[in-house]
Each structure stands twice: as structure tokens, then as C-alpha cells.
Image (tube, helix red, strand yellow):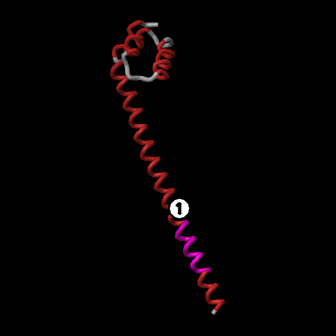
Amino acid sequence: MNLLLEQKLENSPLNDKDKYEIRQFFTFLTDEKKRNLIANFDKIVFSIMKIKYDLRESQKILLWRAITNIENAIKKAKIAWVKSASKQSILNLKENI
């Protein structure tokens, strides 16, 4: 394993899984691509972190939308139930009159 890569990985904000995956595919790269990875390591890490951030933000938005849709469906179901119950109550009153 490349000591410079290990140093960069150790000092990076990447999680253990990401570090492990980089180590795994690093061994299969050509020497030129290994040099390019090390030379552009900071840019690559920045891109990875930005993608992870964007994914988290997208997940938050989707979760918020899902919760809103569920709340709206519950409100509609309650309204429909109240209307149905009211209609039934009115019918029962008419029968009793």
C-alpha cells in the first residue's frame, strides 16, 4: 500500500467504509492512475463529501414530502369519516322523526 495514500486517508474526513473502498480499488489502478488519485486526492474527497451532503439533503426533502403527503391523507380520511358519520347521524334522526 502507498504510504502517501494512507497518510491522506488518515487525515481525510472520509468514513471508514469509504477509506476501505478507496484502498481496495487503489490496488487495481495503473501506476499513472495511482499518481493521479494521490495528486487529486483533495478534490476527490471534496467531491465525495459534496455528493454525500447533497444526498442527505435530498433525503430530508423527500422525507418531508412523504410526511406531508401522509398528513394530508390522514386529514382527508378524517374529513371523509366525519362527513360519512354526519350523514349517517342525519339519516338516523330522520328515521326517528
- Give the residue drawn at x 47%, y 14%: 26
Task: Give percent across and percent down for residue 21.
Answer: 49, 20
In this picture, is 94 found above or below 7?
Answer: below
Determine which quarter of the picture holds residue 82: bottom right
Residue pictured at 34% horizontal, 14% vertical: 39
Instruction: Name the dominant secondary structure of the magenta segment.
Output: helix
The residue positioned farthest toward the right in the image shown? 95
Q: Is residue 82 left or right of residue 3?
A: right
* Amino acid type, callout 1: Ile
Q: How dense is the environment of label 1, judged by Cα within 10 Å: few (below 14), some, or many (20 and up)?
A: few
Q: Quadrant of residue 51?
A: top left
Coordinates of residue 80 in the picture (x, y in percent): 55, 71
Q: Is residue 85 inside the magenta stretch?
A: yes
Residue sitting nearer the eye, 83 or 49: 83
Residue beneath the point at 53% across and 61% down: 74
Check residue 51 for magenta coloring.
no
Magenta-tinted stretch: 77-88
Residue in the foreground of this view, choosing between 26 and 91: 91
- Viewer-side residue, 67 vs 40: 67
Q: Secondary structure at mark 1?
A: helix
Q: Which residue is mark 1?
A: 74
Write down the quadrant of residue 12 in the picture: top left
Q: Is residue 54 above or below residue 10?
A: below
Side of 61 where 94 appears, left or right: right
Rendered location of residue 9, percent (x, y): 40, 16
In this view, the residue in front, 78 or 62, is 78
Quarter containing the C terminus? bottom right
